[in-house]
Amino acid sequence: MKDASHCALDYSVVIPAYNEESYLPLTIDRLKKAMAAISEKSGELIVVDNQSTDSTSALAKRLNVRLVAEKVRGIARARNAGAQVARGKHLFFVDADTLVNEGVLRKSLEYLSSGQVGAGGAVLSFDQTQGRLLFGVLFPKMWNFISRSLKLAAGSFVFCRRDLFEECNGFPQNLYAGEEIFFSRAVKRLCRKKGISFEIVSDYPVITSSRKLLWHSNLRITANLLLLVLFPFAVRFRSLCGFWYHRPES
């Protein structure tokens, strides 16, 4: 990875994408609007096509963003591949089904530019509850409480100084789920050593898709969450992380 002193831009936004032709246009549109509103900072958008079988790659080209190909499936690999070619001093990682507003982007950049914050994330909100009280309404509230209390970033929105990202060796590529939690913990330790903080932006939530609530039953979601809690080593095996990698055909 390149040294931070060689970065030509203030920040780079990396979007890992696997078969995201439905969500990518709006995600990029919102990001472009947020970036344009912060004209004093220079940034770029990078889409990492992670072996898509739909028109994700062609769509990214039409939307005039940088396109990178990562041939090995895995969201950690896709994020790291984007960071590898990024030209920004600071790095942002945004899921392809997540809408970022000007407020959260500006606040995150202010944190990073202050020199007092090395990395962080943001609270989130679902685009729809899908009529599910437990997972559509209560779960995001519970996660936001955990995120603010324990200073853990959701994968939908993560920001970090490039030098810290490189010192942490990026997202752990031996994990197939929960990699953002392990990354948060690693970069938090590094921040503490350097006398700076890891912050969660609470005033401006990002809006992320609740599509998994349409794909899976409450029982399936609960079973997968329990699997991670009771057997955390499961995230090291792709075969045990199908919940995050398998999608309905339609």
Image: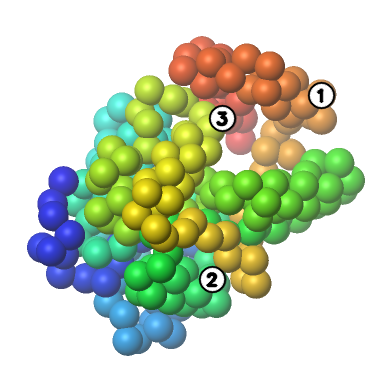
Is 35 rendered above or below residue 149? below
Say which of 178 and 250 sits in front.
Answer: 178
Name the residue carrying label 2.
104
Amino acid type, label 3: Trp
- The coloring applied to the image is rainbow
Q: Residue at x 19, y 51 (%)?
A: 85
Residue indicated by mark 3: 244
As drawn, the residue found furthest toward the left would be 6
Q: Amino acid at mark 2?
A: Val
Please say whether residue 22 is visible from this viewpoint.
no
Could you tell whether 124 is left or right of 21 in the image? right
Q: Position of residue 52 (x, y in %)?
A: 38, 37
Disc 2 to disc 3, C-alpha distance: 26 Å
Which residue bears the numbered disc 1? 219
Tell me, yes or no, whether the two marked residues, 2 and 3, touch with CB atoms within 8 Å: no
* Disc 2 element: helix
Q: Which of pointers 2 and 3 lies earlier in the amino acid sequence?
A: 2
Query: How many numbered callouts?
Result: 3
> Helix, strand, or loop for circle 1?
helix
Comparing labels 1 and 2, the label whose residue is closer to the camera: 2
Q: Which mark is residue 169?
A: none
Estimate the spatial distance between the alpha carbons at disc 3 and disc 1, rounded to whole Å. Answer: 15 Å
Residue found 42% across the figure and 64% down from its top? 117
Residue flagged by tag 1: what amino acid is it?
A: Leu
- Mark closer to the observer (2, 3): 2
Q: Quadrant of the C terminus?
A: top right
